[in-house]
């Protein structure tokens, strides 16, 4: 089971690169192994062989609440008041974390501030009910949460999955020949040989044990899926709400060509997330498509690196121009988005140095003008280059000859989803889930609040520790990706 989870996490590595972890159960105890790093760095054959069981959850971390530390890696773990082990993984970001932390402190919830992310706090709240089962406690806690959350969690014998009422982040249910799978994207089901059953519904809690699958709703569904999943976050071979992400991105490129035509010699993508839109742009414009930038496959996604310095270094490490291809050419450069503007400035400078005559930038999303509080780490308006600038101001800032963004209408039409079922807050500032006060929002809302020592010895070997006879650790992330498997 740990190996299946490992392969599932490999398929979801793009959703988080800071830490990885897996929890397994053999029916008597929950074992958690986590560490900072990529999936391939955290796990090896010996480690996976030691994680034995029939039930597992796993996670890759992209931090949007709490620093990039070992304590904040997931799955998070708690022993419940009834003595049951509880491991939880989280994709998303809550907006009432400060309120939940205050409730936990007032109620004296044990170990509520072991880590500084919202995922760990939710685990503590569910584990703190001695009079309720894990399932019943979850049904009480989940309605108190506001924000984006796709959870997978487990005790010794049951796998659980839950999704916020808006369904901001994806979560899908799959079937193995002898078990079930829940994952952030359908691509993770493909890699482990599972068939897609359906999406976990917004506001739904699923429990899977030896008796099969049961479902109940803790809140009415009000779908508002993140449109940025189609633009950047999800893998192109994933399907969301019945729409293939690759097909959506190609269609965005076609619409870009119609909305922002230009005379040029070559269309090139910023690989990899700009590639499908570049294909669509070339197809609709009749301008030849070519590869003008070579990507170093061993450098991660620069957008989701945790520090600005690493982001800027990562851009140059990640991409290099093919001088013979672009020299003397008028280029259309297609990228998925402009957030901070660092990538585009560096790219345009490299392309001009390599001999490009003109550089026309086309973007497969509208201008990002507002922070995301639902699981994407650009939570300050000051970081956003389009904040306060018109399109020509952004063009001048990145030194492009022309700049065109796909319209909001064009983007939504490409997803084939109704506009009222999508979250477009980062483009419009219209947040479908009400936000709290600004001082209790942001990545570091729990840093320094009620910090207490871990109620166990710190591990001496990577991230495996013992807790009252059970192996424990933690690995989870707001904005990361989770994968969960169980036998029937």
Image: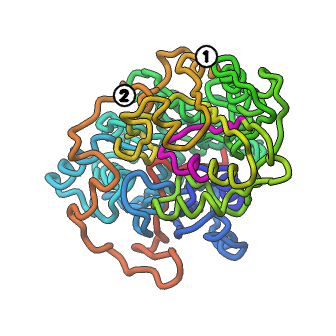
The reply to whether the C-beta atoms of the residues labelled 2 and 1 are less than 8 Å apart is no
Q: Quadrant of residue 353?
A: bottom right
Q: Quadrant of residue 454?
A: bottom left
Q: Give x and y (percent) for residue 382.
A: 34, 45
| Quadrant position of the C terminus in the picture | top right
* Magenta-tinted stretch: 332-346
Q: Nearer the viewer, residue 33 or 12?
A: 12
Q: Is residue 473 above or below residue 375?
A: below
| Quadrant position of the N terminus in the picture | bottom right
Q: Is residue 289 left or right of residue 110?
A: right
What kind of colouring is applied to the model shown? rainbow
The residue under the point 57% across, 61% down is: 22
Q: Give x and y (percent) for residue 367.
A: 49, 31
Q: Earlier in the sequence, mark 2 or mark 1?
A: 1
Q: Label 2: which residue? A: 429
Q: Residues within 10 Å of mark 2 (few under 14, many from 20)?
A: some
> CA gap, disc 2 to disc 1?
20 Å
Q: Nearer the viewer, residue 488 or 185?
A: 185
Residue 413 is labelled as: 1
The residue under the point 22% across, 61% down is: 449
Residue 289 is labelled as: none
The residue under the point 72% across, 73% down is: 45
Q: Is residue 220 above or below residue 151?
A: above
SS at circle 1: helix
The residue under the point 38% across, 62% down is: 67
């Amino acid at each position: 089971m740990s190996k299946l989870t490992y392969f599932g996490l490999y398929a979801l590595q793009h959703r988080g690169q800071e830490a990885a972890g897996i929890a397994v159960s053999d029916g008597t105890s929950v074992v958690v192994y986590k560490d900072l790093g990529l999936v391939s760095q955290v796990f090896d054959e010996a480690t996976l062989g030691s994680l034995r069981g029939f039930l597992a959850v796993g996670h890759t971390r992209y931090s949007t609440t709490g620093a990039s530390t070992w304590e904040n890696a997931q799955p998070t773990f708690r022993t419940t008041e009834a003595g049951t082990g509880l491991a939880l993984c989280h994709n998303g970001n809550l907006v009432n974390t400060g309120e939940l932390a205050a409730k936990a402190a007032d109620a004296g919830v044990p170990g509520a501030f072991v880590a500084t992310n919202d995922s760990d706090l939710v685990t503590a709240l569910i584990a703190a009910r001695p009079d309720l089962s894990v399932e019943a406690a979850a049904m009480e806690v989940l309605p108190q949460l506001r924000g984006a959350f796709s959870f997978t969690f487990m005790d010794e014998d049951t796998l659980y999955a839950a999704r916020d009422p808006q369904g901001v982040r994806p979560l899908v249910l799959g079937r193995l020949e002898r078990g079930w799978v829940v994952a952030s994207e359908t691509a993770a089901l493909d890699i482990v040989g599972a068939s897609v059953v359906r999406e976990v519904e917004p506001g739904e809690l699923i429990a899977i044990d030896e008796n099969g699958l049961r479902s109940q709703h803790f809140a009415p569904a009000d779908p508002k899926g993140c449109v940025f999943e189609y633009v950047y976050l999800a893998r192109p071979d994933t399907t969301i709400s019945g729409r293939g992400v690759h097909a959506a991105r190609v269609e965005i490129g076609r619409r870009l060509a119609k909305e922002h035509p230009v005379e040029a010699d070559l269309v090139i993508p910023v690989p990899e997330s700009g590639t499908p839109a570049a294909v669509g742009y070339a197809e609709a414009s009749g301008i030849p498509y070519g590869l003008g930038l070579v990507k170093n496959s061993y450098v991660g996604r620069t957008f989701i690196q945790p520090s600005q310095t690493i982001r800027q270094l990562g851009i140059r490490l990640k991409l290099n121009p093919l001088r013979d291809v672009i020299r003397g050419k008028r280029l259309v450069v297609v990228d998925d988005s402009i957030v901070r503007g660092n990538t585009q400035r560096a790219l345009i400078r490299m392309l001009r140095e390599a001999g490009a005559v003109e550089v026309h930038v086309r973007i497969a999303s509208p201008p990002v003008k507002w922070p995301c509080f639902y699981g994407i780490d650009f939570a300050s308006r000051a970081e956003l280059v389009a904040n306060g600038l018109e399109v020509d101001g952004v063009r001048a800032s990145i030194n492009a000859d022309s700049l065109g963004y796909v319209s909001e209408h064009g983007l939504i039409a490409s997803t084939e989803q109704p506009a009222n079922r999508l979250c477009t807050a980062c483009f419009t500032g219209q947040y479908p889930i009400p936000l709290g006060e600004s001082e209790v929002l942001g990545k570091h809302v729990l840093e320094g609040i009620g910090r207490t020592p871990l109620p166990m010895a710190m591990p001496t070997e990577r991230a495996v520790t013992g807790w009252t006879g059970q192996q424990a650790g933690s690995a989870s992330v707001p904005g990361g990706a989770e994968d969960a498997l169980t036998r029937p």
